[in-house]
Amino acid sequence: MSMNNKKKKAETCGQICIHDDIVEKVQQNMPEENNLYDLAELFKVFGDSTRIKIIWALFESEMCVCDIAYLLNMTQSAISHQLRVLKASKLVRSRRSGKTIYYSLADSHIKQIFELGMEHITEE
Amino acid sequence: MSMNNKKKKAETCGQICIHDDIVEKVQQNMPEENNLYDLAELFKVFGDSTRIKIIWALFESEMCVCDIAYLLNMTQSAISHQLRVLKASKLVRSRRSGKTIYYSLADSHIKQIFELGMEHITEE
DNA sequence: ATAACATATGAACAATTGTTCATATGTTAT
DNA sequence: ATAACATATGAACAATTGTTCATATGTTAT
């Protein structure tokens, strides 16, 4: 009977280098796989300068699609596509007034997250 | 003499919909283009679940490449490539001890950023 | 009903990205 | 010097992504 009973994470490295005690301790304190995945998805949304600009613009004021396109010197279509992404992540909400649709921020954490990110960037 | 003197952000939308006053106010409060770009680059680094996992693991303890590969059940090569990305963004630092190289976090903001991100995700 | 405006959306394309594979580099014990 | 280990790295490939273009949908004034 060969020792193939521990399939998962067995022969990843296979060497002696692994610090079992540390790895085990770390493993116990890791958040759920799903949450880590969702967190990556959230940051992926922040990981595009067009979306960053849209969000930062909305910090200041609610705006319509046309305003944002004009402000960022981009196509209405490009902005619409990105707003859809932001809305899907519940970062932005919209309200209609006649023909125009106004977008605004839907989450209070975003500004803090961005400011902390700025701190990292503007260091040293 | 035609009115082609305002090239930039002129015919983006071209319609009447633009709220000049709001756009102007927003424009004045926007951070520098470069900073916005760098911020997006930073979040892009966070926008991958492998890197998220590596960082979260390092919250708990310094670890060597082999440990991380084992913990995440991934190739040593894959982890090495990602650590390089993290190092380039100054999120992680490394120290050598004999043959093994230990990685640890290099920035104090990361944890706060991640925790705020988690709050957004785990809402409603 | 119709024309004009504001926004949304699908397909297509170029560009970017994460992993794998093979192999190079660096370190230690012998 | 050499073998074994730990890590780094380049090329290749599939997969993902942002913008453009054309056009659809929704609203209002006439």
Image (cartoon, coloured by chain):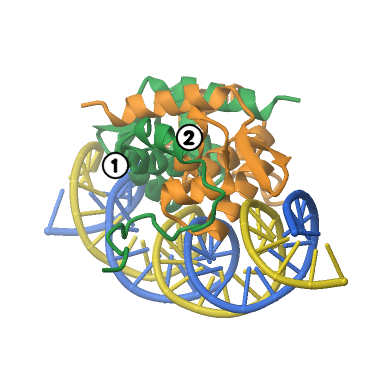
Chain colours: A green, B orange, C blue, D yellow
Left or right of residue B27: residue A81: left
Residue at 62% x, 27% y: name it. B107
Q: Report the Cα–Cα distance between label 1 and label 2.
A: 23 Å
Relative image position of residue B97 (x, y in whole percent): 71, 40
Total labels drawn: 2
Query: Residue A8 location in percent, x, y?
Result: 33, 56
Q: Label 2: state its secondary structure.
A: helix
> Which image quadrant for residue A44?
top left
Amino acid, disc 1 = Asn
Q: Amino acid at mark 2?
A: Ile
Sequence-wise first label, 1 or 2: 2
Note whether B119 is above or below B16 in the view shown. Answer: above
Q: Could you say which is closer to the camera, residue B20 or residue A124? A: A124
Q: Answer left or right for D7 relative to A18.
A: right
Q: Same subunit under labels 1 and 2? A: yes
Q: Is residue B40 above or below residue B79?
A: above
- Numbered mark located on residue A34 in the image: 1
Q: Label 2, on which residue?
A: A22
Seen at 26% across and 68% down, the residue is: A1
How far from the left and from the top, in percent, is residue B92? 63, 36
Q: Residue at x 39, y 57 (%)?
A: A10
Residue name at image x 48 percent, y 35 percent? A22
| Residue B38 x, y percent position in the rendering | 64, 38
Mark 1 closeness class: few <14, some 14–19, many ≥20 residues within 10 Å = few
